[in-house]
Amino acid sequence: MEATNRLQRSRLALVTLGHFLNDSYGSFFAPLLPLLLEKLSLSLTAASGLAAIPSITAAVFQPLYGMASDRIHGRMFILLGPFLSVVCMGLIGVVPHVWLMGLLLLEAIRKHYLAKK
C-alpha cells in the first residue's frame, strides 16, 4: 500500500512540475521581444501582433480543447502539451522570419492549453 501511495505522489509531483514548466514558458516571450524586434527587423505593429497571439488563441481555442479533451484520452493532452510547448518556444530564438515566429507562438500556446486539461 505504501509503494502505491509513493508512486501516486511521484506521478502527481511529475505532473505538477510539468504543468509549472509549461505555464512558465508563456512568460518567456515578452522579455525576448526587444531582441526579436532587432533580429527580425520588426515594426512595432508586427511585434504587438505577435504579442497578441497568446491572448487571441486562448480566447478562441480554450473551449475547443476542453471539448476535445473530454472526448479523447486526457493523458495524451498532459504529455503532449508541455512537450510541444517546450519545442516551439525553444525554436523562437532561431526562426528567420516573422511568419514562422507567429506559427511557433500559435503552436506553443495551443499546446499549452492542451496541457491544461
Image: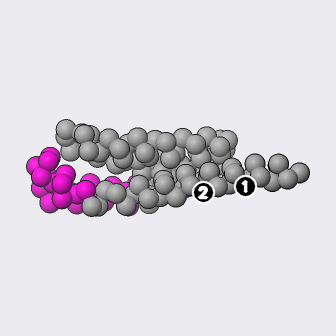
Q: Dot 2: few (<14), some (14–19), or many (≥20) neighbours within 10 Å?
A: few
Which numbered disc, 1 or 2, marks the residue that appears first in the sequence?
Answer: 1
Q: In the rendered view, how is the structure colored?
A: one colour
Quick check: 15 left or right of 56? right
- Which residue position is annotated with label 1? 9
Q: In terms of image quadrants, where is residue 50? A: bottom left
- What residue lies at 14% left-to-right and 47% top-to-bottom? 39
Identified by mark 2, the residue type is Thr
Identified by mark 1, the residue type is Arg
Q: Dot 1: few (<14), some (14–19), or many (≥20) neighbours within 10 Å?
A: few
- Which residue position is annotated with label 2? 16
- What residue lies at 65% left-to-right and 45% top-to-bottom? 74
- What residue lies at 60% left-to-right and 57% top-to-bottom? 16
Instruction: Please tell me whether mark 2 sits on a helix, a strand or a loop.
Output: helix
Query: How far apart are labels 1 and 2 at the CA level?
Result: 10 Å
Which-is-in-front pick, marks 1 and 2? 1
Residue 106: percent from the left, percent from the top?
A: 37, 47
Magenta region, main secondary structure: helix
Quick check: 16 left or right of 5? left
Q: Is residue 76 magenta?
A: no
Instruction: Please tell me whether mark 1 sits on a helix, a strand or a loop.
Output: helix
Residue 58: percent from the left, percent from the top?
A: 44, 58
In-front residue for pair 97/65 = 97
Quick check: 85 left or right of 92? right
Q: Would residue 75 be seen by someone viewing this image from the given angle?
A: yes
> Looking at the image, which residue sits at the far right?
1
Q: Is residue 47 magenta?
A: yes
Q: Which residues are magenta?
A: 32-57
- What residue lies at 44% left-to-right and 46% top-to-bottom? 85
Residue 65: percent from the left, percent from the top?
A: 55, 50
Q: Would residue 56 be seen by someone viewing this image from the given angle?
A: no
